[in-house]
Image (cartoon, rainbow, N blue to C red):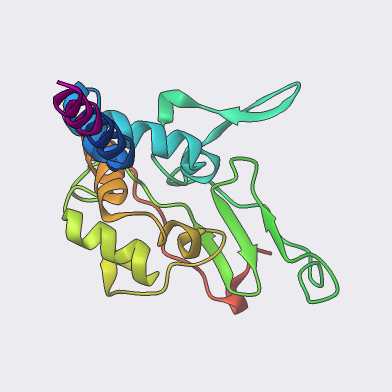
C-alpha cells in the first residue's frame, strides 16, 4: 500500500512539474484564452487606427485656421494638397544649410526645401487623382522603397517613408484597406517642383 501511494504521489509530482515547465503558449491554449482564438481585427479599423496615430492627417489633410493654430479639416480628410491653392512666395535666401531646412504653407500640405517643393498626395481612392488605381502591392512597395507607386519618382520630404517601411506587410495592407474605404475625392495634386522653381 505504501509503495502504491508512493508511486501515485511521485506520478502526481511529475505531472505537476511537467505542467509548470510547459511553454506559456501550450498552457494558454488549454484554457482557450490565447490570442489565436480571438477574432482577427478588421483591417479597415486597424488601418484607420494606424493612419490616425501615424500622423497621416498632419500633411495629407488640409487645415482650417483656429485661434490655437491649424487643425485638420476632416471634411477634406486625406485629400492631399488642395488643387489650385496658390503658394506664397518664398524669399530668396530663407532656405539653406545655415538657415531654414524647410518652409510650409498654412495647410501643411506643401513643403519647400533644398529638394524643391513637394505636395502631399491625395490618399482617397479616386482613380484619376488618388490611390484608386493602386494595388496593395504597389502601396507596400512604395513605402518600402520610397518610390511613387513602388517604382516611380522618389517620395520627397517630409514624407517619413523611411520609418513607415519598418511596418509589417499586414499593417501596411491595413492602412491601404482603410484608405480604399474612404469616399473618393477628385483632387489633382500638383507634381513636385524642382529647386530652381521655388515660388517667388
Q: Residue furthest right?
A: 98
Where, quadrant-wise, is the C terminus in this rendering?
bottom right
Residue 189 x, y percent position in the rendering? 39, 52
Where, quadrant-wise, is the N terminus in this rendering?
top left
The question of residue 29 being in magenta is answered with no
| The residue stretch that appears in magenta | 1-11
165 over 106 or under it: above or below: below
Q: Is residue 20 left or right of residue 135?
A: right
Residue 149 x, y percent position in the rendering? 27, 65
Q: Is residue 59 left or right of residue 13?
A: right
Write the residue at 46% across / 34% down: 52
Write the residue at 51% across / 59% down: 160
62 over 130 or under it: above or below: above
Total marks drawn? 0
100 over 133 or under it: above or below: below
Residue 63 x, y percent position in the rendering? 57, 33
Q: Is residue 184 visible?
A: no
The question of residue 2 being in magenta is answered with yes
Write the residue at 47% across / 46% down: 81
Residue 195 x, y percent position in the rendering? 60, 76
Q: Main secondary structure of the magenta part?
A: helix
**Relative to the observer, which residue lies in front, 67 or 85?**
67
Amino acid at each position: 500500500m505504501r509503495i502504491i501511494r508512493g508511486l501515485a504521489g511521485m506520478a502526481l509530482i511529475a505531472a505537476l512539474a511537467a505542467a509548470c515547465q510547459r511553454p506559456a503558449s501550450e498552457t494558454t491554449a488549454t484554457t482557450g484564452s490565447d490570442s489565436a482564438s480571438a477574432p482577427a481585427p478588421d483591417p479597415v479599423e486597424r488601418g484607420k487606427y494606424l493612419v490616425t496615430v501615424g500622423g497621416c492627417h498632419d500633411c495629407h489633410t488640409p487645415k482650417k485656421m483656429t485661434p490655437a493654430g491649424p487643425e485638420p479639416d476632416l471634411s477634406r480628410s486625406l485629400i492631399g494638397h488642395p488643387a489650385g491653392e496658390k503658394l506664397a512666395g518664398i524669399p530668396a535666401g530663407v532656405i539653406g544649410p545655415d538657415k531654414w531646412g524647410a518652409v510650409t504653407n498654412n495647410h501643411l500640405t506643401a513643403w519647400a526645401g533644398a529638394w524643391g517643393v513637394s505636395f502631399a498626395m491625395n490618399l482617397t481612392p479616386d482613380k484619376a487623382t488618388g490611390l484608386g488605381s493602386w494595388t496593395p502591392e504597389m502601396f507596400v512597395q512604395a513605402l518600402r522603397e520610397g518610390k511613387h507607386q513602388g517604382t516611380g519618382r522618389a517620395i520627397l520630404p517630409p514624407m517619413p517613408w523611411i520609418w513607415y517601411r519598418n511596418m509589417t506587410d499586414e499593417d501596411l495592407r491595413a492602412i491601404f484597406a482603410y484608405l480604399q474605404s474612404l469616399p473618393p475625392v477628385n483632387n489633382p495634386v500638383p507634381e513636385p517642383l524642382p529647386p530652381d522653381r521655388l515660388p517667388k
